[in-house]
Image (cartoon, rainbow, N blue to C red):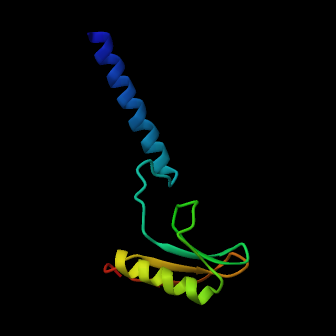
Amino acid sequence: MVKSNSKSSWVTAIKQLIEAILQALGHSTATKRTWHQHVVPYEDGWAVRREGNKRITSNHRKQSTAIRRAKTIAKRKKADVIIHRASGGIRERICYRDDE
C-alpha cells in the first residue's frame, strides 16, 4: 500500500512539474476552446473555420458570403471573427464578446 501511495504522489508531482514548466513557457495543458471564427482562403474560394479546428464549418465562393456566415456564428457564440487575406495574413478582427 505504501508503494502504491508513494507512486501516486510521484506521478502527481511530475504532472504538476510538467504543467508548471509548460505554463512558464507560455503553453497550457488545459487550453480553453474558443468559438472564434476564421474566414480563410480555401481551394477556389473561402471558408469559415472555428479556431483550433482542422475541418471547415462552411465553404463559400465569395469572401463576403463567408464573412456574413462567420459573423452570424460569432454573434450567437459571443466570439470574434478573424478575416484573413488571400495570402493568409490577418486583414481584420471583429469582436462580438461582452468583455471588450
Closest to the observer, 71 or 87:
71
- Going by the picture, which residue comes out furthest to the bottom? 64
User: Quadrant of residue 54 in the image?
Assistant: bottom right
Q: Is residue 10 left or right of residue 37?
A: left
Q: Position of residue 35 (x, y in %)?
A: 42, 69
Closest to the observer, 5 or 77:
77
Q: Is residue 96 left or right of residue 44?
A: left
Q: Which residue appears at 69% of the width and 75% of the height?
A: 88
Q: Position of residue 91 (x, y in %)?
A: 62, 84
Q: Which residue appears at 40% of the width and 58% of the height?
A: 32
- In the figure, 82 relative to 29: above or below? below
Residue 92 shows in this picture: no
Residue 21 shows in this picture: yes
Q: Is residue 62 left or right of residue 50?
A: right
User: Quadrant of residue 60 in the image?
Assistant: bottom right
Q: Position of residue 73 (x, y in %)?
A: 42, 78
- In the figure, 64 relative to 30: above or below? below
Closest to the observer, 31 or 66:
66
Q: Quadrant of the C terminus?
A: bottom left
- Going by the picture, which residue comes out furthest to the left? 1
Q: Which residue appears at 42% of the width and 78% of the height?
A: 74
Q: Position of residue 42 (x, y in %)?
A: 68, 73
Q: Quadrant of the N terminus?
A: top left
Q: How many marks?
A: 0
Q: Which residue appears at 52% of the width and 69% of the height?
A: 57
